[in-house]
Image (cartoon, helix red, strand yellow):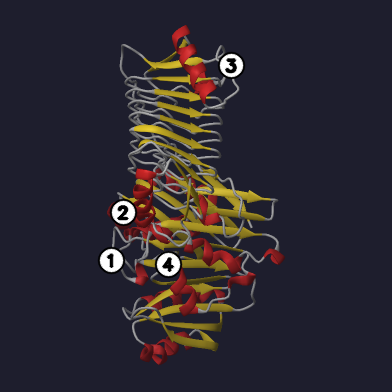
Amino acid sequence: MCGVAGFICRDPSAAVGNNFIDMLKELIHRGQDATGIAFYENRDDIQIRVAMSDLHQQKELEKVIQKYGTISKERAYKGVGIFSFYEASVDMDLDAIGDLYWEIDSSPEFCVHSLGEHIKIYKDQGSAETLKECHKMSPSGATHGIGHVRLATESTENINFAHPFVSYLLPELAIVHNGQFTNYFNLRRKLENLGVRFKTNNDSEMAAHFLAYHMTKKGIDLEEALYLALDELDGIFTLLVSTPTQVGTVKDRLGIKPMLFFEKDDNIVLFGTEQICLTPIVSDVYASEMEPGGIKIWSV
Amino acid sequence: MVRLDLTGMNSRNANKKLKVLIQTEDEIEVVGTHSIHNFATALIGKSKITAHGSTGFYTGGFLEGPTLVIEGNTGWYTGDNMMDGEIIVQMNTGSNAAPSMLGGTIVIKGNSGSRAGWGMKGGNLVVCGNVGRWSGKMTLGGRIIVLGEVGEGIGESMYNGIIHVLDPAVEEKLGGNVMIVPIDDKEKKETELIFKKYGIEQGVDDFMSIVPKVYGRHEYKLYKPTHKKVI
């Protein structure tokens, strides 16, 4: 099943980000294995978030990061389940982000959740309520964001397999996915032959790498990449994709998986699997449904 | 008349309560519906149940006899496998309204989503607003009446049954294996009776009917990718 939600808030005074997690609360019946959100904010430092298998590994992780830059404002804490989290601001070269990303990810003890100038990703097991309580996030200044509640069907129940997914190729791109890809192994093999490295064996991670690979190596924009995804990815899916400047969505041609959107006075755009998840932001909504095989892009 | 407050109650308990009340009460007023899923499913009886608020998925599924009035919106699969009785939704419904419905009447005063009346086997579905794509697909019987616009692929692969529509652009949106025929006098009278019963002010002379073709099969269009393969 799974549920997705997202928002764009062009008016900072509306502070939609504050209530974003409540949108996912309304989707609790669509999955409780894991909940995750990715949001983008205007800030002037690079921030990193990593999941560790134990709190003691913080020193080891810092050693790796210090090879690339200096750390400040670090925080390490225990998550809802067995994993611990590390969060810090890193003063480093922007071009080295991909290398640092992969160096951390190559250790089985760590998994980068987000690394970038705008993006921040929080994901953990359980419901939106427990995510909010445990992680003490502050998305109030967020310009846009996407979120996901997971019912694990295709791969293991591990928070590193939870959405949103990012790619080290384009760390500021995040995706959430509702559905299944039936040509996952074929496309993964093709991408691996082209040099793309995978961290998990979740089919949605492939979609993140697929889009990131074509946007970076082939130089196409988000809209073209989504058209390509519509043709190349097989199965039933709706993808909600965000970059620091755009949010896009694609729905497969069978149109099985729902995706609704609602625009209010040019300032707020809301996305969601069900209409009820839009109600914490705008109480009286009448949302439009994405057409099967449809692609839509919004600028932030 | 009895009043039932569903605040803080889950679907199972709400339906258990309704099942008991329906034995003795003629009219049940329900408040605090908080978009509850599976509202009033599998109820057998003759009572009138009025919900003051919106309800969630599978509202009135397997309903057999009662009259259900929802003074708000409903979610997906309203009246799933309904056997008999009435469901009147004062606002809109989600997708897949009245799937596999066997009997009774569903009246939707607002709009409905895609796939309204999928696989219907009997009864009446009246939508006063618009319906989405693939409505009336693979219906096996029954009657669907749409007063507003219809979506693409209406009546696709119908086996039996009939769809009455007003939308002048219906010909472009017609599904495969169905055709448009004029509404006949018997159908006009039956439709008029339904409109009169539910207070719908609409003439019946302009309706067109969609019925399955009696011969021929689909032309299947094979999917061809429009983009070049990059990898």
Element type at mark 1: loop
- Residue A113 spot, x, y in % from top left: 44, 73
* Residue B220 visible in this rendered orientation of the protein: yes
**Height in image: A193 above or below B112?**
below
Q: Which residue is mark 3?
A: B203
Q: Residues within 10 Å of mark 1 (few under 14, many from 20)?
A: few
> Which residue position holds label 2?
A184
Cα–Cα span, label 4 and label 1: 14 Å
Q: Share a chain, discs 3 and 1?
A: no
Same-subunit check for callouts 4 and 3: no
Q: CA distance from mark 3 to mark 1?
A: 58 Å
Secondary structure at badge 4 equals strand
Tell me if B105 is positioned left or right of A13 in this view.
Answer: left
Residue marked by disc 4: A35
Real-space Cα separation, disc 4 to disc 2, in angstroms: 23 Å
Foreground pick, A241 / A136:
A136
Q: Nearer the viewer, mark 4 or mark 1?
A: 4
Dot 2: chain letter: A
Q: Nearer the viewer, residue B164 or B6?
A: B6
